[in-house]
Image: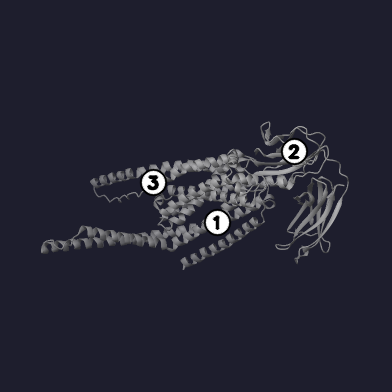
Amino acid sequence: MATRRGTHVVTGARRRLGALLAVLVAALGLVLGGATAASAHATLEGTDPARGSVVAAAPGAVTLTFSEGVSLAADSVRVLDPQGKAVDDGKPEHVDGKSATARVALRSGLGNGTYTVAWRAVSEDSHPVGGAFTFSIGAPSDTSVNAAAVQGAEAQGAVAFAYGTARTVAYVAFALLAGAAAFVLVVWPGGTAVRGVQRLLMTGWVALLLSTVAVLLLRGPYERGTGLGQSFDLSLVRATLDERIGTALAARLLLLAAAGVFLSLLVGQLGTPQPKPAAPEPADDPEDEEEAELRRLERAAAEAPQRDARLGLGLAGLALALALTATWVGADHSAVGIQVALALPLAAVHLLAMAGWLGGLAVLVVGLRHGLPAAAVDRFSKLALWLVSALVATGVYQSWRGLGSWSALVDTSYGRLLLIKVGCVAAMLGVAWISRAWTARLRTADESAGAPQEARADESAAVGAGESAAAESGAAESGAAGGGAAGGGDPARAAQLARQRALRDRARGERGAAGSPARAGLRRSVVVETSVAVLVLVVTTMLTNSPPGRVAQAVAAAPAAPVAGAPAAPGRTEELKLPYDTGGRTPNAKGTATVTVEPVATGPNQVTLKLADSTGQPAEVPELELAFTLPDRDLGPLPVTLQPQGTGSWTGTAQLPLNGMWVVSVTVRSSDIDQVTATRQLKVGP
């Protein structure tokens, strides 16, 4: 009765954890479904000439200042005249060696008009950044440059998906490779002789090799916003190798070559079946005691080579794992920001602990199908406790370092992803608790089954001895009677029968071990735990592609771009009313959007957007977008970043580089399926 009640408790807990896992997957799906491309991690803080400014004389160079260091390529900063021709020397460089700056010289003799500066670089945490702005010499003018076409920092959709997938596969493969190797070295040395474990090790190594090559090839198109067809462009690959992340990827490939040699040694040294030493017999006299001591010494000498091999392989594997970890932490968020000297080693510990836990779970799933001893399961359970402790401790520090404030948990995509990761880890800990309960049952079951098995073995041995004696007696009698013609005491036949009995007994024992309720329950629990761990790795990859909450909040709080030297505002204010009806049934589905633009001139314009429902009351909607398009010049749409200013009110700045008849579009989404876009014309200039 107690066993049945305990089974019900474990089953109920498993159901609750399954429901929690479903909620976490749904939350991750919502984040993925509503996510846009990752924002840049370095921001443009200032320019010379200033954005939107009018200067009296042509400058000799254009200088950009960023919030953190960036790496530059030959086309990182381009300056285009009103006709779209390049007027820079094509040699961007850092100012006085400062990595947070970029400067490109301009040709002499530039005429009056509006010039477009398009820039694209790679921030210190390996993420591409880009944008565009205009300045004018003498007076603003028309320009043929499509600012929307030259300013994008976002990668093409297919490239971004392939690049993100390759990075996720690399994380999972590293966890499988490093964790599986650690498991067989520390917990289950005999596992290297199991074909399933060997396949896990080889799968991790091959997947990490292929994903690293894929990231290296896709990095160039990802940075420059080009298509998949540019993946095999050797010039882009060479440019990637000159960057920090390219150096890390090249080092990873070299380390994987060494890891291949390590795996061959690991399987060759530990995968060879070792002769099992005979159990010491009880000694009753001094001579027997001396013989037993001699046997112990012989046994220790026989085990020494494998023990030394495990120690040497363990040290080599640890060095390789640390070096591979450095290829990640040296090119992500840990390498920039505050407390870099502390963040780098803690990030390495975090990644190694994750690999040890996840890779160990994968080997545990395989081992439970191939007679993994309960003692080995118990050792891994204790090791996993230390790994989880390291994960939690280093994760708390990384969260504090990346967030910066409590509000960033809900106000930034980084914080929301972090909450999902915390939920996934909590689910993992819950499943791990169930796994520990199954581990205790497995240990108890094996201990209780040990005595009957020994009794059966003794009984079989006794029966075998009796049969042998009977066979020898019969053989002797037959030999005496028939002169040995019958040959009844054939030793080859007796040895064959003994081998068949041994194989039958071993197969029966393996079937019993694999089919025990405790072993099957532990296997199911570990499979669920591994699935949640893979989900954690997916969220981790998304976190590395998102700007930390500390950076995102700093960007949001930054003041509007300076417009020193801009002409005085003519004082004109235009108010546009755009009725909308999304067709939904909610109160906010129908109403009026009021757009106020000031000063309605080229350059920066202050924009206010207010929404009112059909009764005239301020309305809130799930999604709202405002954009400006100049159809005559094929310019736009130029989106406006809106900042909420209370219920139903938003403000932003619209950069309008040219005079003409602009089209103002307001997209309102009142529910998950109800959306409409309303448009009105706005004339800028005479």
| Percent x, y of residue 106 | 73, 34
Mark 3 or mark 1, which is nearer to you? 3
Left or right: where 65 falls relative to 189: right
Q: Kindly report which numbered mark, 1 or 2, lies closer to the viewer in this rendering.
A: 2
Tell me which corner region of the image, top left, top right, bottom left or bottom right, holds residue 48: top right
Seen from the viewer's position, the closer of residues 207 and 664 is 664
According to the picture, the residue beneath numbered tag 3 turns out to be 268
Q: From mark 3 to mark 2, how far is it between C-alphas?
A: 61 Å
Callout 2: 10 Å neighbours few (<14), some, many (20+)? some
Give residue 90's position: percent from left, percent from top: 68, 36
Q: Nearer the viewer, residue 260 or 221?
A: 221
Say if residue 342 shows up in the picture.
Answer: no
Residue designated by label 1: 532
Dot in front, 3 or 2 = 2
- Amino acid type, callout 3: Gly
Verify CB contact (< 8 Å) between mark 1 and mark 2.
Answer: no
Q: Give the Cα distance between marks 3 and 1.
A: 33 Å
Disc 3 is placed on an element classified as helix
**Residue 525 shown left or right of residue 144 in the figure:** left
Residue beneath disc 2 = 47
Q: Say which amino acid is labelled 2.
A: Thr
Q: Earlier in the sequence, mark 3 or mark 1?
A: 3
Task: Say whether marks 3 and 2 touch (CB < 8 Å).
Answer: no
